[in-house]
Image (spheres, rainbow, N blue to C red):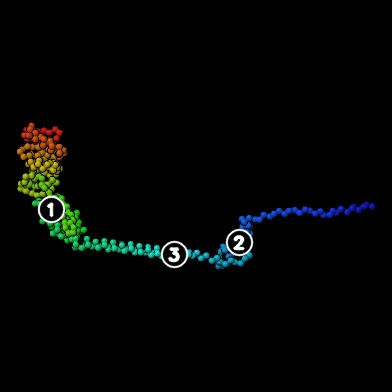
Amino acid sequence: MKQPPPPPRSYPPQPHPPQPHPQRAEPSERARQSAASTSRSRTDRVVPRTPNPGERVGAPVRAGSALAPPVTPRAPRRTVVAAGSAARFAERAELQRRLTRRRLDRTSAVIVVLLGLGWLGFFSPVFKVDPARVVITGADAIVDRAAVDKVVVAHAAGIPLPRLNTPALRDRLLEIPGVREARVTRVWPRGLAVLLVTRRPVVAVPTDGAFVLLDIDGVQVGRSQDAGGLPVASVPANNPRTLRAVLDVLGGLPPELTGEITTVGADSEDTVTMTLRGGAKVVWGSAEDTPLKIRVLSVLRGADQTKGAKTFDVSAPTLPITRS
């Protein structure tokens, strides 16, 4: 018969040496904040649901909690102003109002002054032209003084000087026969100074048994039965260009030479001739080089060799010709 196996030997438990526990590290502040945020995000989960009538759509609610009440808008933050600042602001506003009123007062005063000056100058009788204070100079026998006075009275008398149209008055004076230039100047407070330049006849043109007196511009100054000591012009009829050439030559001559001319004529613009007292003839040509021709003629008439010549041809002043 078999023997049963012996029971297993049991050993008494051996005591284990105590193991040191590792020291737990305290979590940092950032870790604690992150854990708190994670816990809130897991807890504050929004559960979508169908909104009830009148309920604000999109309002977040906690899972399992009652419907959150509507959010009331936050009232604006009130700005607190110190008592001293409020006083300064009020003082500044009052100063600005005073400056505005002062500007308005000044502007109103300027407008009133301008209106007063405008009335005084344009409508007041203080500056009206007095015919007794109008001084006219330059009028002689060629210009009718009565015609000048009539124009001045008609266009200036009783009109305030600021409103007087002096260019228009000048134009009216130029329409008077014999007036070549006119200048009108205001003389405050009620006077005028009128300066006239009369037309002087420089040539006499025979026409119908009389002489028409022309000035340097070819304007008729008057008529006379004799030439009155003026050069007698002989030019083709209805030829203003030839007459213009003769007048240009006479206008460029010195007074002493003009006084010696008895007749002047031309068949064209380039054939002006003159006759001097004593019978000498001067062939002048055109009106070009007039100053040089004057000097050459003076030399020829004064030289012993050519003093008694009957013809002086200075149409080509660099090559003058004399004939006895």
Amino acid carrying label 3: it is Gly
User: Residue 89, can we see it?
Assistant: no
Q: Residues within 10 Å of mark 1 (few under 14, many from 20)?
A: few
Q: Say which residue label 3 marks.
A: 84
Tell me the residue at 13%/55% (across/down).
Answer: 136
In this rendering, is residue 178 above or below 96? above
Task: Report how far apart the C-alphas of labels 2 and 1 lie in the structure.
Answer: 111 Å
Q: Which mark is residue 46?
A: 2
Amino acid carrying label 2: it is Val
In this rendering, is residue 112 above or below 9? below
Question: Residue 152 appears in which quarter of the rendering?
Answer: bottom left
Quick check: 42 left or right of 104? right
Tell me the residue at 75%/53% (across/down).
Answer: 19
Q: Position of residue 170 (x, y in %)?
A: 17, 53
Q: Position of residue 220 (x, y in %)?
A: 11, 48
Q: Which structural element holds mark 1?
A: strand
Task: Report how far apart the C-alphas of labels 3 and 2 lie in the structure.
Answer: 51 Å
Task: Report how far apart the C-alphas of labels 1 and 3 lie in the structure.
Answer: 79 Å
| Residue that lies at the very extreme toward the top in this rendered image | 305
- Give whichever of discs 3 and 2 has the lower sequence position: 2
Q: Is the residue under label 1 in contact with that under label 2 (CB below 8 Å)?
A: no
Q: Is the residue under label 2 in contact with that under label 3 (CB below 8 Å)?
A: no
